[in-house]
Amino acid sequence: MDTPLLLVPSDPLTPRVPDEHFEREADAARQAGLDVAIVDHDAILAGDVRAAVRRVPMADGGQTAWYRGWMLPSAAYSLLATELGARGVRLLTGPAAYRAAHELPGWYGMFADLTPASVWLPWKAGRAPTTADVSALAEALGGGAGVVKDYVKSRKHEWHEACFVADLADTAATTRVIARMVELQGDDLAGGIVVRAFEQFAPDAGGGRTQEVRVWWVEGSAVLTTPHPDAPSGTAGEVPSEVYEAVGMSVRALGALFVTTDLALRSDGVWRVIEVGDGQVSDLPANQDPARLMMALMRASPIRE
Ligand SMILES: Nc1ncnc2c1ncn2[C@@H]1O[C@H](COP(=O)(O)OP(=O)(O)OP(=O)(O)O)[C@@H](O)[C@H]1O
Ligand SMILES: [Mg+2]
């Protein structure tokens, strides 16, 4: 039997060891019974995927692997899966499942009742959208406030400039915000433009930003609940069991094996899914013990007879 692998990014300065950001997870993975191997994240992004996986031991085809690392564009993940396959290593989350959990158009259908209404348009990085491009998209949501992002990431830190739209019926203003979002994402624009209906979330107890709860799912079961990494000591309140049940149904319908869902309490007291992510590239706050996550990944690794 081949021991399942956890692949983590290498330290950019010492390529033989895990990036310090993932060191604790690598240790917890070994404790849980996984082997750890290293991939070179920068080489993946540079398109040199063969070099990126050269430290992954060659296997005979029965070796399975999980990844825990920095976000990868879906196309890069697909190339990574192919190169690992050539070394006899199979990523348990295949490229299609990764894309489905990572990009909003992939998961939206399964979560439509639980997440703000959203529309999207495939878009090329660097191309400036015009009012004509934007009007049909924004109109589909029927006006009101909105939030824009690409298929994966927003410019939430440039909220008024490139994220929030006060009224989607104001096509000129909507186009300005979307165009700025596209410009700031630059070559990193993932997939296209997403426009979402704005919903009012409850501020945290201190009156600040909305607190989000990140629920980690392995094979459709919630294995860990943490704060969002942006507010690692935040407390968004207890998620009721019926919310876990409803979100779990959508996670299982999505079918990806390792998923995160970021939940927030809306001002009217309804828990909502803000976004879904592939668990392999969701950040775990530094104050959280990765042991349970790694044990769940170990349990979910098929064992060859
Ligand atoms: N539809 C919405 N209505 C109100 N607020 C929203 C909406 N969508 C997003 N937000 C706010 O904007 C923030 C960023 O949105 P989102 O999580 O989708 O983007 P992101 O860039 O992927 O963030 P992350 O850092 O979590 O990966 C959220 O944390 C939330 O506070
Ligand atoms: Mg988010």
Image: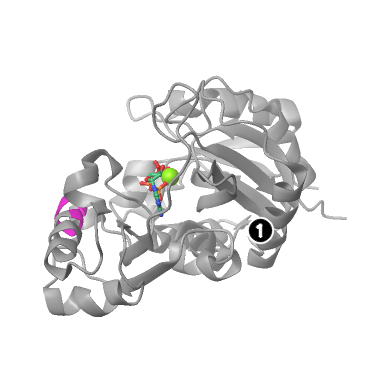
Identify the image quadrant of residue 182: bottom left
Residues shaded magenta: 181-185
Number of numbered markers: 1
Q: Is residue 17 visible?
A: no
Count residues near mark 1 (Cα–Cα under 10 Å), then give few for <14, some for 14-19, many for 20+.
Answer: many
* Along the viewing direction, whichever of 115 and 249 lies nearer the viewer: 115
Seen in the picture, residue 300 relative to 38 is either above or below; the reply is below
- Say if the magenta span includes residue 301: no
Q: Is residue 159 left or right of residue 50?
A: left
In terms of depth relative to the viewer, which is nearer, 160 or 39?
A: 160
Q: Position of residue 107 (x, y in %)?
A: 53, 64
Q: Looking at the image, in which quadrant does ligand 2 appear?
A: top left
Query: Label 1 belongs to which residue?
Result: 251
Determine whether the beta carbon of the residue marked 1 sits less than 8 angstroms from the nearest atom of ligand 2: no
Residue that extends furthest to the front in the rendered view of this protein: 268
State the residue at coordinates (26%, 51%): 164
Q: Position of residue 131 (x, y in %)?
A: 13, 74
* Placement of 88 over or under 11, stated as above or below: below
Residue 96, image quadrant: bottom right
Front residue (pair 296, 211): 211
Please indicate whether residue 56 sits to the left or right of residue 45 in the image.
right
Residue 304 position within the rendered picture, expressed as x and y whole percent measured from the top left: 82, 55
The main secondary structure of the magenta stretch is: helix
Q: Residue at x 50, y 42 (%)?
A: 282
Q: Where's the C terminus, which quadrant? A: bottom right
Q: Give the left or right position of residue 67, taking residue 150 as reference.
A: right
What kind of element bears circle 1? helix
**Which colour assignment does the render follow?**
one colour
Q: Residue at x 50, y 43 (%)?
A: 267
Q: Amino acid at mark 1?
A: Val
Image location (x, y in percent) of residue 7: 55, 41
Is residue 218 visible in the rendered image? The answer is: yes
